[in-house]
Image: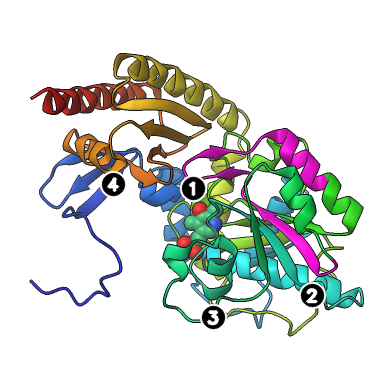
Amino acid sequence: MTSHLLPVFARIDLAFERGEGCWLVTTNGERYLDFGTGIAVNSLGHSHPHLVEKLTEQVGKLWHTSNLYKMPEGERLATRLCEASFADTVFFTNSGAEANECAIKIARKYHAANGAPERYRMITFEGAFHGRTLATLAATGQKKYLDGFGPVVEGFDQVPLGDVDAVKKAIGPETAAILIEPLQAEGGIRNVAPQFLKTLRQLCDQHGLLLICDEVQTGIGRSGEIFAYQRAGITPDIMTLAKGIGGGFPFGACLATTEAAKGMTPGTHGSTFAGNQLAMAAGNAVLDVVLAPGFLDKVRRTSLLLKQRLAEIKDRHAGVIEEVRGEGMLIGMRAAVPNGQLVDALRAEKLLTVAAGENVVRLLPPLIVGEEEIDQAVDMIDRACTRIERAQAA
Ligand SMILES: *Cc1c(COP(=O)(O)O)cnc(C)c1O
């Protein structure tokens, strides 16, 4: 059958009908263990009773009124996000890319408000992923995504990750900010040393730059902390969130300090849909669970268990898995075979994962994952590796 969807995705021939916790059920009734969570989106798994209850309640009351009016649910979510972070103010968006667009605008406007509109450039890092809009693509800076889409949006200077000298050299009279993912996710679960983040913070303070953390993938508990920047003991000036923030409801947020956001006066930014009542209900419901005492402790304990079990698998199947890395529920297995082959072999065992850069296979379980599902996943990975080794030997 001809598809009328724009063919920008090479879709896998699987369709799901329902989800229960860590499991997805296909239209044919087959069960898959979901360690992909729609690319780190279903942070609390599928059909979480608290999310279902809160969303259902909101669906019967009110969906959308626009940002022309006050919104108590949005005020409440913004207050909770600020209390849990460094920030004073929040702009809600519909996606991660839009959250980063907002961050870029806030940073440029900050310098304009300080009388330095020539400071608009941003330093970004090789291997980054910041989104698919024209400006966030320029920030991402990967040729394969930029090719054929006309002139690249001006103002982004990319340097190698972890290279302090390159960052220092890139800072000039036009630099406005440094934009970094505290852990590169799409790039292949590439860790960023806490010391490097500390150095960036110092360089920003020294040169009057804003530090922006893109936590679209790492935020809201995915790293094992509520926000991944906390692992480095620093605070950014601006932070972006999306993916897991609504547990599957699409929205994002850009958080900032009052100082960083001082250029953003009425009329300087906006969105028709963003921050509507359904999104805010989803966001508040996710925070009810993730901020509950002990929840993130359990995520960290389960993460440790998963990493230990994966290290055993890696030792047993060194010809298939070269390295295990990552934090919290953002774990990468660097493959010794093409990562797509490993993703396919895992799917054949009914385990869903997601490929990433540097030939990595990403494991992104729901934050609610338990020991039992970890055991099942590890058995599936073990079998998939054996299957690949047998095919190699044949
Ligand atoms: C996914 C992602 C984005 C883009 O988010 P969209 O919602 O797809 O626009 C931006 N930054 C990071 C770090 C991401 O992982």
Q: Distance between the Cα atoms at labels 2 and 1?
A: 29 Å
- Residue 259 placement (x, y as % from top left): 87, 63
| Disc 4 element | strand
Q: Which mark is residue 109?
A: 2
Q: Is residue 327 above or below residue 20?
A: above
266 in magenta: no
Q: Which mark is residue 19?
A: 4
Q: Which residue is mark 3?
A: 151
Of labels 4 and 2, earlier in sequence is: 4
Residue type at the position of mark 2: Lys
Q: For mark 1, what is the residue?
A: 187
Give whichever of discs 1 and 4 has the lower sequence position. 4
Identify the residue at horizontal 67%, vertical 63% (top origin).
Answer: 157
* Amino acid type, callout 3: Pro
Q: Please identify, in this view, whether the residue under mark 4 or under mark 2 is nearer the observer.
A: 2
Q: CA distance from mark 3 to mark 1?
A: 24 Å
The answer to whether marks 4 and 2 mark residues whose Cβ atoms lie closer than 8 Å is no
- Between 305 and 89, the one lying in front of the other is 305
Q: Is residue 22 visible?
A: yes
Kindly report which numbered mark, 4 or 3, lies closer to the viewer in this rendering.
3
Q: Earlier in the sequence, mark 2 or mark 1?
A: 2
What span is colored magenta in the figure?
173-201
